Amino acid sequence: MAEHLLFLTGHLAKTRLERILAGLGATHFTYEIVDIGVKVAALMTEEIVVRRLSRPVTADRVVLPGRFRGDLERLSEAFGIPFVRGPDEVADLPAYLGRAGKPPDLTRHDMRIFAEIVDASALSLDALLLRARKLAAAGADVIDLGCLPDTPFVGLADAIARIKAEGLAVSVDSANTEELELAARAGADYLLSLTEETIGIAIQYPTTPVLVPAQPGDLDSLGRAIEIARKAKIRFLADPVLDPIHFGFAASLGRFIEARRRWPDVEMMMGTGNLTELTDADSSGVTAVLAGLCSELFIANVLVVNVSPHTIRTVEEHDRARRIMFAAREDHALPRGYDASLLQIHDRSPFTSTTADIETLAGSVRDANFRIMTAADGIHIFSAEGHWKAESAFELFPHLKVEADGPHAFYLGAELMKAEIAWKLGKRYSQDEPLAWGAASPAEVDDRTRLAKAGHTLRAKKDIP
């Protein structure tokens, strides 16, 4: 039997909600819409729902606006059915409802992230631990200690012990066989990067080697290392090595494809830093493409590095990418409509309302409060006093008549500039909400069980005698 959904909304959004749901066509669920009796859906509260929603509710789930302020668990207990928040914008309902009427599951993935601390040997133990904790919080599964050429890692054994005491897995990346053997004795979980000539270290100790070609691009030597590991019956990862653009990039992609063809059951690794670090492009897009390649080839390990400031969120980006690609592969679908974390500069659907929608809303406003919205034709600001549109925040100021109200003018200036930035970039704008930058900038945790506090400018205005 199809799931039946009940959507709660307000007066202004009801018609648009009806149109969007009707536009879904045939669905795996049935639905009805209830206008709870407030003008703006986001002003709905827990008390209003309890008081105005008629019992019994004949639905399998009740979907509330994403900005609803209230305790969903208490509502679920009061009515005996699950209450859930939908998306913040009604325009996002089709993506939220997905193929089965539920949001996509991004809790799963099958990719291990190795996060390299390139200058590990130059850091104090306390600094190293702090960096490791931050990387783990960002999504890293293994902390990779990079060893510098001609720079002895004096505290390597202590570093491995302390990081493992934090409950984290550790890998060590060195071209020095003495350092690699010391790391193995100290309990490193993985050793990078061993060849057919150095794999003996991993056979002597309970550690997992990451095998690479003895000579750049030589898959045959990688194959010989794989055979040695198989005969020794030890676990290993194979990394054909991804090269930078114009220095063998295309050929290295071919090596990964050929390696998967030759060894269909071998666990593989890809180091993404040669692309993310050495290409002046936003790393989120580069990461998405490489994660997609790993997903197709079932490469379950990635080595991630952040040296360049433009890759500061690379671990977070890889974490989101592995979840998106896993969900899309499981659905046999394109990796779109699952999550916006990698759409940092532009949004797929930047405008939640058309110009006609805004004009209709502006015509219904009867108070002096300014509403700010964006559409394809520019920035709109309106109240009962009028409706103005421009492509620049400065063009709108003369219409607002707030010269004598400093806090209000400051607030409107900040909001209009935010709207201008969003409009020019093709990003989503919502009044009084921060712009969303995806994985590029952590979003503030919003407690939606409580009503939002008054803004700084409103508090400042009230303090003026």
Image: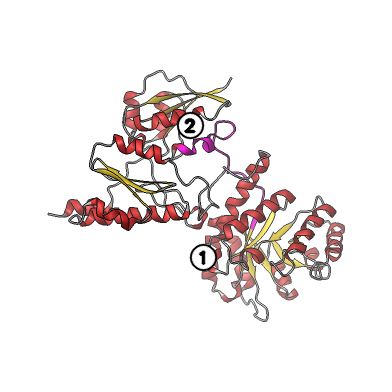
Looking at the image, what colour scheme do you see? secondary structure
Q: Is residue 120 above or below residue 231?
A: below
Whether residue 95 appears in magenta in the rendering, the answer is: yes
Whether residue 5 appears in magenta in the rendering, the answer is: no
The amino acid type found where label 2 is placed reads: Ile
Q: Earlier in the sequence, mark 1 or mark 2?
A: 2
Quadrant of the image containing the N terminus? top right
- Residue at (28% x, 37% y) in the render: 365
* Camera-side residue of 446 and 255: 255
Mark-to-mark CA distance, 1 and 2: 48 Å
Q: Is residue 216 above or below residue 206?
A: below
Mark 1 burial class by Cα count in 10 Å: few <14, some 14-19, many 20+: few
Q: Which residue is mark 2?
A: 20
Q: Position of residue 263 (x, y in %)?
A: 83, 53
**Element assignment for label 2:** helix
Q: Is residue 378 above or below residue 36?
A: below
Q: Position of residue 251 (x, y in %)?
A: 77, 63
- Residue at (82% x, 56% y) in the render: 258
Outermost residue, left direction?
465
Quadrant of the image containing the C terminus? bottom left
Q: Tell me which segment is drawn in magenta.
A: 91-113
**Element assignment for label 1:** helix
Q: Position of residue 45 (x, y in %)?
A: 33, 34
Mark 1 or mark 2, whichever is nearer to me: 2
Q: Which residue is mark 1?
A: 130
Magenta segment main secondary structure: loop
- Left or right for 376, reference 36: right
The amino acid type found where label 1 is placed reads: Leu
- Left or right for 291, reference 402: right
